[in-house]
């Protein structure tokens, strides 16, 4: 049985070490990040079941990170517990309004932290083990992993989000601007040609790993179709599938 995966985001090594030890002893799988940017890299590599997020992070604050988590369709359902030294009621209310599922003020005991984690996980435990399949290609949303047949598909974080969006919205044409809005964060300006670059990378990976996996249904890169004058469309059928 897979262990529950928890991401700790805190810039204080002593706090991360204490929390990580407590969680490991309670049989949780633990990943650590010391900044918001590092946290998002880890989230897209291996979607956690819960995030412990420090309020006072360097660069982007925990509240700013939380706002980004809430804007992104991929991360908005991940439960978040804020770790904070702030005790003013308005600060705590702000955290809950932005989207935190709970908060715990520093200093805290490992016993209290574990109790809060268990409570939040119980409340969020209704998430389904969603499986989306397209021929030999499978997206396991709970595992945050793609498979070709029974072999994991290795993708970079942006290519992962792009392919996940396509599989959730098949057979519909999207402009480059629409893909930027739905797949990229929107925090900074990104040229629409960036979409073409990542589409090429995604097609290349699908073609290479489709061949290496022994797929005989047709190259999976052909699932991503170019729509002239518009953008791209993801076909729900491989070339070798029988016509309806």
Image (cartoon, rainbow, N blue to C red):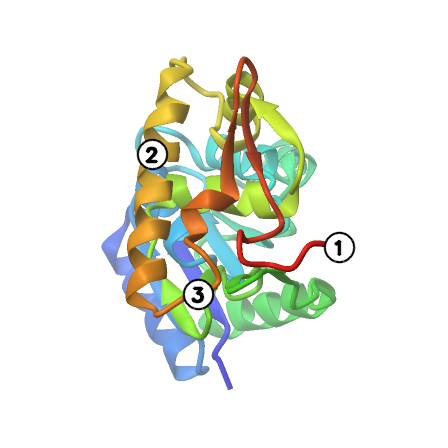
What residue is shown with label 1? 244
What residue is shown with label 3? 148
Residue 97 point in image, percent of width and height: 69, 35
**Residue 45 occupies which quadrant of the picture?**
bottom left
Q: Which numbered tag is attached to residue 200?
A: 2
- Residue sitting at x 35%, y 62%: 31
Asked if marks 1 and 3 touch (Cβ < 8 Å), the reply is no
Vertical order, 1 against 118 (above or below): below
Closer to the chain start, of discs 2 and 3, is 3
For label 2, the SS is: helix
Vertical order, 143 against 184 (above or below): below
- Residue sitting at x 64%, y 46%: 168
The crowding category of the residue bearing disc 3, from other C-alpha atoms within 10 Å (few below 14, some 14 to 19, many at least 20), is many
Count of numbered badges drawn on the protein: 3
Residue 110 point in image, percent of width and height: 45, 71
- Residue sitting at x 64%, y 33%: 94
Asked if marks 2 and 1 touch (Cβ < 8 Å), the reply is no
Of the residues tagged 2 and 1, which is closer to the observer? 1
Residue 88 point in image, percent of width and height: 59, 36
Of the residues tagged 1 and 3, which is closer to the observer? 1
Q: Nearer the viewer, residue 168 or 210?
A: 210
Q: Nearer the viewer, residue 117 or 108?
A: 117
For label 1, the SS is: loop
């Amino acid at each position: 049985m897979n262990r529950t995966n928890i991401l700790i985001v805190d810039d204080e090594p002593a706090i991360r070490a204490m929390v990580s030890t407590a969680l490991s002893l309670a049989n949780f799988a633990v990943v650590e990040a010391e900044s918001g940017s590092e946290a998002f890299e880890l989230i897209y590599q291996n979607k956690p079941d819960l995030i412990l997020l420090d309020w006072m992070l360097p660069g982007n604050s925990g509240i700013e990170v939380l706002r980004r988590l809430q804007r992104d369709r991929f991360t908005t359902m991940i439960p978040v517990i804020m770790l904070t030294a702030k005790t003013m009621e308005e600060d705590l209310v702000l955290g809950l309004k932005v989207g935190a599922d709970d908060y715990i003020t520093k200093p805290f005991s490992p016993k209290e932290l574990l109790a809060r984690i268990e409570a939040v996980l119980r409340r969020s435990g209704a998430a389904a083990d969603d499986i989306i399949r397209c021929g030999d290609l499978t997206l396991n949303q709970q595992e945050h992993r793609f498979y070709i047949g029974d072999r994991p598909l290795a993708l970079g974080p942006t290519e992962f989000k792009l392919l996940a969006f396509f599989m959730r919205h098949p057979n519909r044409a999207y402009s480059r601007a629409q893909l930027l809005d739905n797949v990229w964060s929107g925090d900074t300006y990104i040229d629409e040609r960036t979409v073409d670059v990542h589409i090429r990378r995604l097609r290349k990976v699908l073609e290479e790993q489709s061949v290496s996996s022994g797929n005989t249904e047709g190259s999976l890169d052909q699932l991503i179709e170019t729509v002239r004058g518009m953008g791209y469309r993801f076909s729900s059928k491989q070339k070798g599938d029988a016509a309806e």
